[in-house]
């Protein structure tokens, strides 16, 4: 098949950092700790590790194959590969719709993060009493103006990066931010492990007690694997379309998955020992890092304010790398339809800002608190839409895409040895991934 060309990532390192930036974001730093805490710690982690390699990595490689083979966004990639079956366009449409909804959720959380970073920097956060952090969070989250202003500030930063393009915007920023994120996270881990009682947090994270893991928890582990890797929504198809032709897709995918898993575990090491050290509960839900961690930081004495600044800076950087990939995927989809890039960015930004603003009114006594829109969006995308998109993608690659096209991309047109191809194609893509996704999805719906 002839493939078209377009300007993409300038280097393999830049490609890995950009794709890893999409994966190593809020899904690791915000979502993983509270989901892991909700579903029992170590048992959840074990199931999550299985899903991230057996399903997540397979799906990432599948999306890279589709993207690099066609050099197009999800809206056109499926039709290009299967022009006689236009119904497959629905997978691309579903993916970009999921991107749009996830971006709205991310903007809300990012707005909280911007506010908490500012309060940490100015000392306002440390001035809040230990017993008042929950009400402090709810007062901010349920206000009508402040959360919207913060999410708009964050969105503006994303717009500037995406308008810079793939090489000068996304790749350049990702190559700078990802190493900084890892260093900041390592500092926080070291400090967390020195706290009294930290061993209880490590036991909670690494000791698997499957009595605490329900069918809903298994579904949540799958959703988290897909969510944290940014697969099942078409982002990696877009980034795959930017990958250099010489890249080894197996190696690139493995690097991203290992980095993503490592950051999730490091986030757990940074958070759970600190939470247990203060006698708090890890099952606090979406507000874990905003309601519980400030108490932890206050208990650290003079280092507490520095730790708070570093943590919320890290969370802001994680949010930025994730949101950039979502905004880019949506922009690429509209741009391929003939819309100018600047106009596409503006349209997506306005739409996501409106939806995020509405979702931000879901808390406390907010204007739309009875709608619970934020919770609905988070549950809908993280649990169901990602799984459905992932299922349709692996079915397409395993049963409808030409086998020779898949082999050609994995072997870089015959220049690489791909001894794993039969296992990957005949078992993982065609059998294991579809069955696992279907079973867990049905279990989640029925349960």
Image (cartoon, rainbow, N blue to C red):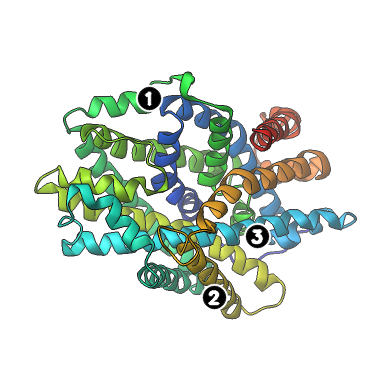
The quarter in which the C terminus is drawn is top right
Q: Earlier in the sequence, mark 3 or mark 2?
A: 3
The answer to whether mark 3 and mark 1 are in CB contact below 8 A is no
Instruction: Classify 357 as above or below 59.
Output: below
Q: CA distance from mark 2 to mark 1?
A: 42 Å
Q: CA distance from mark 3 to mark 1?
A: 35 Å
Per the image, label 1 sits on a secondary structure element best described as: helix
- The residue that mark 2 highlights is 350
Callout 2: 10 Å neighbours few (<14), some, many (20+)? few
User: Residue 207: image x %, image y %?
Assistant: 38, 21
Q: Quadrant of residue 81?
A: bottom right
- The residue that mark 3 highlights is 97
The quarter in which the N terminus is drawn is bottom right
Q: Earlier in the sequence, mark 3 or mark 1?
A: 3
The answer to whether mark 2 and mark 1 are in CB contact below 8 A is no
The answer to whether mark 3 and mark 2 are in CB contact below 8 A is no
Q: Quadrant of residue 252?
A: top right
Question: As rendered, which of 447 and 45 lies closer to the eye?
Answer: 447
Q: Earlier in the sequence, mark 2 or mark 1?
A: 1
| Residue at x 44%, y 61% (from the top left corner) | 108
Question: Is residue 244 visible to the viewer in this orientation of the structure?
Answer: no
User: Residue 296: image x %, image y %?
Assistant: 21, 43
Q: Residue furthest right?
A: 84
Instruction: Classify 370 as above or below 34.
Output: below
| Residue at x 71%, y 53% (from the top left corner) | 69
Question: As rendered, which of 343 and 425 lies closer to the eye?
Answer: 343
Q: Quadrant of residue 313?
A: bottom left
What count of labels does the image hold?
3
- The residue that mark 1 highlights is 206
| Residue at x 70%, y 30% (from the top left corner) | 439
């Amino acid at each position: 098949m002839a493939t078209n060309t377009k300007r993409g990532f300038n280097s393999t390192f830049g490609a890995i950092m950009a794709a890893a930036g999409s994966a190593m974001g809020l899904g690791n730093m915000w979502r993983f700790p509270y989901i892991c805490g909700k579903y029992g710690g170590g048992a959840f982690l074990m199931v999550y590790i299985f899903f991230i390699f057996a399903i997540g990595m397979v799906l990432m490689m599948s999306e890279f194959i589709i993207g690099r083979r066609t050099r197009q966004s999800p809206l056109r990639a499926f039709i290009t590969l299967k022009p006689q079956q236009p119904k497959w366009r629905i997978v691309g449409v579903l993916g970009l719709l999921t991107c749009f909804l996830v971006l709205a959720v991310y903007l809300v959380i990012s707005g909280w993060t911007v506010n908490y970073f500012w309060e940490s920097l100015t000392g306002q956060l440390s001035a809040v009493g230990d017993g008042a952090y929950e009400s402090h969070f709810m007062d901010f989250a349920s206000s009508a103006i402040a959360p919207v202003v913060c999410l708009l500030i964050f969105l503006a930063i994303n717009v500037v990066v995406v308008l810079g393009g793939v090489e000068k915007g996304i790749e350049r920023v990702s190559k700078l931010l990802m190493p900084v994120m890892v260093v900041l996270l390592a500092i926080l881990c070291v400090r967390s492990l020195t706290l009294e009682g930290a061993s209880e947090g490590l036991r909670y994270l690494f000791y698997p007690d499957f009595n605490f893991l329900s069918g809903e928890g298994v579904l949540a582990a799958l959703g988290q694997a897909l969510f944290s890797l940014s697969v099942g929504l078409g982002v990696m198809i877009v980034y795959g379309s930017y990958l250099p032709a010489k890249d080894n897709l197996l190696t690139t995918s493995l690097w991203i998955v290992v980095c993503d898993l490592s950051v999730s575990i490091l986030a757990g090491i940074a958070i759970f020992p600190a939470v247990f050290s203060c006698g708090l509960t890890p099952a606090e839900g979406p507000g874990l890092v905003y309601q519980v961690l400030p108490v932890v930081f206050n208990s650290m004495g003079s280092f507490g304010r520095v730790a708070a600044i570093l943590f919320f800076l890290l969370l802001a950087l994680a949010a930025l790398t994730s949101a950039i990939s979502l905004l880019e995927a949506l922009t690429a989809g509209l741009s391929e339809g003939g819309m100018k890039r600047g106009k596409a960015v503006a349209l997506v930004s306005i739409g996501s800002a409106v939806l995020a603003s509405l979702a931000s009114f879901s808390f406390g006594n907010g204007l739309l608190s009875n709608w619970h829109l934020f919770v609905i969006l988070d549950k809908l995308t993280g649990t169901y839409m990602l799984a459905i998109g992932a299922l349709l993608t692996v079915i397409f690659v395993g049963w409808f895409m030409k086998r020779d096209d898949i082999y050609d991309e994995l072997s870089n047109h015959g220049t690489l040895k791909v001894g794993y191809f039969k296992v990957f194609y005949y078992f993982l893509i065609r059998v294991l991934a579809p069955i696992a996704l279907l079973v867990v999805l049905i279990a989640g719906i029925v349960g």
